[in-house]
Image (cartoon, grey):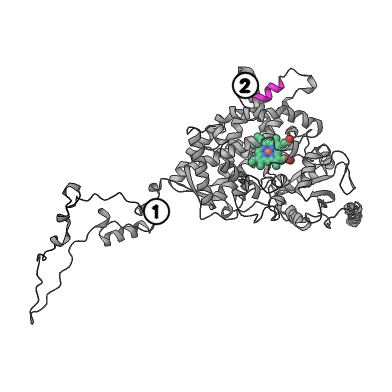
Amino acid sequence: MVTEVLLFIFMILGLIMYIDFKRQFGFWQRKKIAFLPPSFPMGNISEILKSKVHFGYIIQNIYNHMKYSGDYCGIFFSRNPVLLVLTPEFAKTVLVRDFSYFEDRGVYSNESIDPLGANMFFLEGERWKRIRSKLSPSFSSGKLKTMFHTISDVGQKFVSHLKPFAELSQDIEVYDLFARYTTDCISSCAFGFDANSLKDPKTDFVKMGKKVLHFPKLKALKIFFAMGFRDKAKSLGIRFNDEDVQNFFLKMVHDTIDYRNRTGFTRKDFVQQLMDLMNDNVDESDKITFNEVAAQIFGFYFAGFDSSSTTLAFTLHFLAYHLNVQEKGRKCIASALEKHNNEWSYDLIMDMPYIDAIIDESLRINPPVPTLHRIVTKDYTLPNGASLETGTLVVIPSLAFQRDPDIFPDPLKFDPERFCKKSKNFHPFSSLPFGGGPRYCLGMRLGLLQIKLAIALMIHNFDIFPSENSVYPIKIDPATLIHAPDGQKNINFFDYLNFIDIDMSKLVHRDISPFLRSVRNFLLGRKHTNALRFEDDIAARTQPPPTLPDGPSHRFSANYYLSRDPRREVTNPNVISAQKLIPDGVKRTKLPTPGTIYKWDEH
Ligand code: HEM
């Protein structure tokens, strides 16, 4: 009886839900806006449940389907209506022109139980404006210039870390490597603290960094639910950051601030700048609190760590498969070094236009953030006269724009020249890897600085080749929040690259086994060299000029017509040996052999 009652209640609830979804699915039709027919219960993104395709590509498919429908169209994330922007021009309207209607991102956070949720990426309204205006000066080019030596130290350590791999021509799992490089960069810029993860990959910093954005499936679904039903998720106490991540960051910031207050130690990093803001002589209500400081530091980590390391991994992967681009990059670095007295400085990094183009092109094909999100913050009237109510989500499909053949012909071709042309022939809002408008990426300059430095140092010091385990195009992990290479489950999907040091003489050549090698050498009577197989064994094309003895006419003073007349030098040949004929009837003995072998390799 109880089961039947429960079944009845479930059926009634299911029916109510179905009717509610049906009514909701008429949302765009009522507004006379083109829309993609949704299905129960996931709307237009049912594929998300299968976890086989990344969210960015699900949106790209919808965009490709709807892109000739005008400036925008309607879609559904489960029962929630979402306005999908279809043209770069309308993206500009949302991000810049009518920004006051689309100020917030609409992502879920629950500050009451998760204080790190007060970071700038999640903040909304006036509070976001206040914190953004206070923090923007920390990312000015002047401030970054003062931090350059910190990043450059990490860069030099990075090259030393790579050298042994290069010398032995060993494969490297680059995604993991760059995660450690960016961890060291951000930890030293934010905390003035050397996380030392290049040497010790098991540091808490790397572990926590990976935990921030790489969720297990169940948590990913929980967050997805929370994004769609923000109020319900808050009342259910769903949190974005795990408790151990939260405790780790709060303790780290607390200990750093406490130490500096006690000792009076100062350093040019973000903690110091935020501490100065905490101690500012301003109105109490305008003061920045400890939790806000901790949340911002966490936000830099959250927004900067994975995005920078994935960009590096994608860019290096492209470079490994495009040796001509590597070569051109090397020339660009050489000419910049010449211009800047061979000194790796901030100005040098800013003066490498081709390296900029390489990174722009890599970010175009593989943006770490594949969609930009906004929420309507006050009722907005669309160009067709329909009104969008406060709270409606708006999505800008940046990956789809960046891979649209109508905007970028042959979109998957890696061609940095697209960004070199003086008059780029695409709309400025069609490539948006850092977002746009007043809410664009605050750390763009810092991110680009650490990426450019690492790429320039790598091209300058090494040749980069794909290894046997590399795959092209790179495989994408469908289950992460950001658009990142697959490196979690299957070793074959790892992006291994092979750095080969330019000093080729240290390479160990591929050959038969050592035993067979010794048998071969024994049978040959000398050490075998396969002179045509490996580059460093092949004779150089340009050889030094021969040192020949002087000839009879090398001096002009001795150069008379009489002595140069060849007719006078022709005489009967001298007989050196006469051939002995074997007389008839003589028995032939064994023919003579050439004697000892001439050892070519020893001369
Ligand atoms: C290649 C590296 C990076 C990429 C591709 C990237 C991309 C983005 C994107 C697409 C957004 C959203 C923009 C929008 O909605 O219009 C964003 C926001 C943000 N990023 Fe980055 N980012 C990178 C590096 C960094 C770094 C290194 C930091 C800090 C240290 C950082 C801090 C932030 C912050 C604080 C926001 C929120 C800005 C706001 O809402 O006002 N990012 N980033």
Going by the numbered disc 1, the residue's amino acid type is Glu
The answer to which of marks 2 and 1 sits earlier in the sequence is: 2
The secondary element bearing badge 1 is classed as: helix
**Residue at the disc numbered 2:** 259
| Magenta segment | 272-282
In this rendering, the label closer to the viewer, 2 or 1: 1
Q: Residue at x 80, y 22 (%)?
A: 285
Name the image quarter holding the N terminus. Answer: bottom right
Q: Residue furthest bottom?
A: 585
Question: Magenta part mainly helix, strand or loop?
Answer: helix
Give the answer, above or below, for where 33 lies relative to 379. Answer: below
Q: Decide: few, some or many residues near mark 1? Use Cα within 10 Å; few <14, some 14-19, many ≥20.
A: few
**Residue at the disc numbered 1:** 535
* 177 left or right of 55 in image: left
The answer to whether residue 303 is seen in the rendering is no
Q: Decide: few, some or many residues near mark 2? Use Cα within 10 Å; few <14, some 14-19, many ≥20.
A: few
Q: How many marks?
A: 2
Give the answer, above or below, for where 479 lies relative to 390. Answer: below
* 16 left or right of 230 in image: right
Q: Quadrant of ligand 1?
A: top right
* 530 left or right of 581 in image: right
Query: Toward the viewer: 498 or 201?
Result: 498
Residue 547 falls within the magenta-colored stretch? no
Residue 273 falls within the magenta-colored stretch? yes
Going by the numbered disc 2, the residue's amino acid type is Tyr
